[in-house]
Image (cartoon, rainbow, N blue to C red):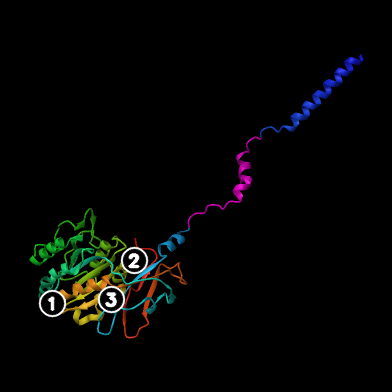
Amino acid sequence: MSRPRQLANSALVIALAVLFAQAAQISPPAAPPSQQQQDQQPEQRPEQEKDQPQKQAPDPRARIRTTVELVVVPVTVKDTKGNLVPDLGKDDFRILEDGVEQQISAFSTEAVPLSVVVLLDDDLKPKAADQLHKSLLAIAGAFSESDEVGLGKFASFFTPVMDFTKDNDQLMAELKKIVSGEDAFPDPESNAPHPSAGDHPIPGFPTGAQQATVDKSTKHLDDALHAAAEALRGRDRERRKIIILVSDGVDAKTNTYNYDQTLALLLSSDISVYAIGTDAALLRRGASPLSRYARATGGDTYFVNNQAALSRAYSQVAEQARHQYTLSYAPMGTDRTQNYHSIEVRVERPGLEVFSRDGYYLVRLP
């Protein structure tokens, strides 16, 4: 072979070697891993994602804590004569939750607008019933234009009479209907449709067929309070929610809701019961269910034996509820896994009586 041809072949070999070397440096696109390989390999994340905190599912307990950041406790204080004590300051109060003292973070003596259900016993003895009817018009004068008032009656069953209104003229008109007897109470033994509020049955009213009762005077006090609480629980939380209950305290053992269930709804909804006891309640006083509900919810009880005292009681209740002390605190040092927490309010000044609710629920009842 001639020398020129040898040189040409050598150059070709060198050129091919260079091309193969360059091709070897270029990696072919990787084939996607099989499903089995994906399952066996740990998940890979870019380095910048590894440094970022991972999102976690929301903790339901955290949501509970945010709903009770501040516990608000209305408080009434009276002297030995039963008069309201209006001159106390923040430092005069101590508040304990589950026995653990709390720091009062907010204190107010400002008047608060009311949301009220006036709940009337429609099965009183003739004398007490006559006193009640003659006193009813005084109810309209107990409330201010900033308050909203609803009316209801009960005997064997609860019956709404008037929805919430701020119109004092409308309230007076409804009261006059009750006094004149125009607002008749339905016979619980009839086959009439069940009373309802809009498209929804009244809470506490039986959903099945009604059974005739031997004793028509049997009253379901617990059920009536439960229904009134259902009506109040959705009202504006900036208002103070109260039930003014006028009754002799007689209560049947056949209620749909018992005392504990009704009290749980009242406390869960921040509702106070102010009871005006007449007739049989005068004999039982502290042992009456009227007193039990009032004490546990931070309300009060008035016992009356004539029309004049009954007429005054409406204004006294409204004034007392509107001008309570308001204490607030952020719970510390108690078991937040528990739903119910007890509350005790103490006053440093001796010889005074304190009225406040027994406790509260972290999560409101459904």
The answer to whether any part of residue 185 appears in the image is no
Q: Are marks 2 and 3 in contact (CB under 8 Å)?
A: no
Residue 328 point in image, percent of width and height: 38, 70
CA distance separating discs 2 and 1 = 35 Å
Residue 268, numbered label: 2
Label 2 vs 3, first from the N-terminus: 2
Give, as a single range, the part of the protein colored magenta: 30-58
Q: Is residue 101 magenta?
A: no
CA distance separating discs 2 and 3 = 17 Å
User: Residue at point 17% right, 77% down?
Assistant: 278
Label 3 vs 1, first from the N-terminus: 3
Q: Are marks 2 and 1 in contact (CB under 8 Å)?
A: no
Q: Is residue 45 magenta?
A: yes
Q: Residue furthest top?
A: 2
Residue 308, numbered label: 1
Residue 358 point in image, percent of width and height: 35, 74
**Horizontal side of residue 194 vs 292, given as left or right:** left
Amino acid type indicated by mark 3: Arg
Residue 292, numbered label: 3
* Quarter of the rendering occupied by the N terminus: top right
